[in-house]
Image (spheres, helix red, strand yellow):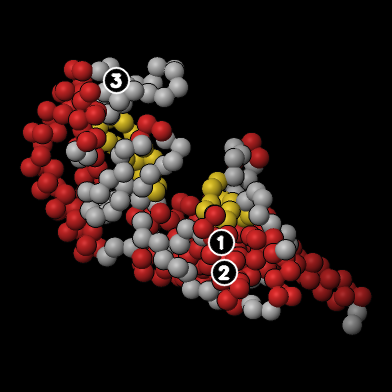
Amino acid sequence: MSVLETVILGIVGKLGADEIKAWLPRLVIWLKDRAVERLPPEYQPRYEEEWASSLEEIPGDLSKLLYAFSLLRASSGIKLLASEGSRGWLRRSLESVVAIVALVAILPVGVAIAISIRLTSRGPIFSKHRRAGADGVEFTAHVFRAFQEETGKSGSQITPVGAFLTRFDLHCLPLLLNVVSGDLGLTEKFPRLPSDESESSDEDHL
Amino acid sequence: MKQTTPRITGPTLKVLREFLIRPTGGLSGAEIARSTGLPSGTLYPILFRLEKSGWLSSHWEEVIPSEVKRPRRRLYQITALGQSASRSAFREHLPSPSQLAWQS
């Protein structure tokens, strides 16, 4: 082999290695994105971020590549597990329809409750809560406000209307909206947050 | 949410052991993968299953991505239910007392 050939081979080899080195990170991201795409839509944002950060933690391009490649199998596994426990689409749709019918039927009651909350205490009609719903996906639940709005003092007082509502679980009627959107099952318990003292009585069984 | 008992497999035990040995703070998927040697394709479905069963919980690392210039890590922690349930799973699957040395 002549000197020239050796030099050319060396240059080509170096260029080839540089090329691979430059493309590997892109391939890793591409694989991760394909894995995220295969997940059910509600899980995509979480795993997009989780896997991106995991890949950042892995040292070495080759290890990253193997990790990303294996994520394709991870997403298939998660997809399968997610469908196992979740309610089927038929049940979800049926529940939505039932919830819509129920919402229309109780609309006058709902309006009456909203007016009475508004007239008897200061503050919003609904109180918002972040909850883990069906399949562990977080959602915002609205219930009729049963407590006095926080005034800076610790602990808040139940309103007279609130006492009546919670006695009959009527404050949970707006949760039907979450059933319509599929966040919550019709027969599911409204998950509690132990840290929320103002919600000691709104565990619900619709 | 309906909670089921997860299927206990060899890799699942590996993951649970990791949480029992290092119970403080949270562990990211990459950390668990490194210490257990499990490929991500096996690990994440296990974490998903254990979280769904209430044995593990997870939360976002409390950093601002724009400040640390990387995405937030998702950190997994073992729950009280997970601790007691996995201890009995270990007793069932690894009956030899020498293998339970980490418990003492």
Residue A87 appears at what percent x and percent y? 29, 63
**Which quadrant of the structure image shows residue B9?**
bottom right
Question: Would residue A15 be found to the left or right of residue A117 on screen?
Answer: right
Frontmost of labels 1 and 3 is 1
Q: Are the two marked residues, 2 and 1, in contact with CB atoms closer than 8 angstroms?
A: yes
Q: Chain of mark 2?
A: B
Q: Helix, strand or loop at disc 3?
A: loop
Q: Which residue is mark 2?
A: B88
Residue shown at 57% from the left, 51% from the top = B74
Q: Which residue is mark 3?
A: A123
Asked whether the residues under marks 1 and 3 belong to the same chain, the reply is no
Question: Would residue A183 be found to the left or right of residue A173 on screen?
Answer: right
Residue B102 appears at what percent x and percent y? 72, 65
Closer-to-camera residue (A90/A72): A90
Frontmost of labels 2 and 3 is 2
Q: Quadrant of the N terminus of chain A?
A: bottom right
Q: Amino acid at mark 2?
A: Ser
Q: Which residue is mark 1?
A: B84
Instruction: Relative to A75, say whether A175 is above or below.
Output: above
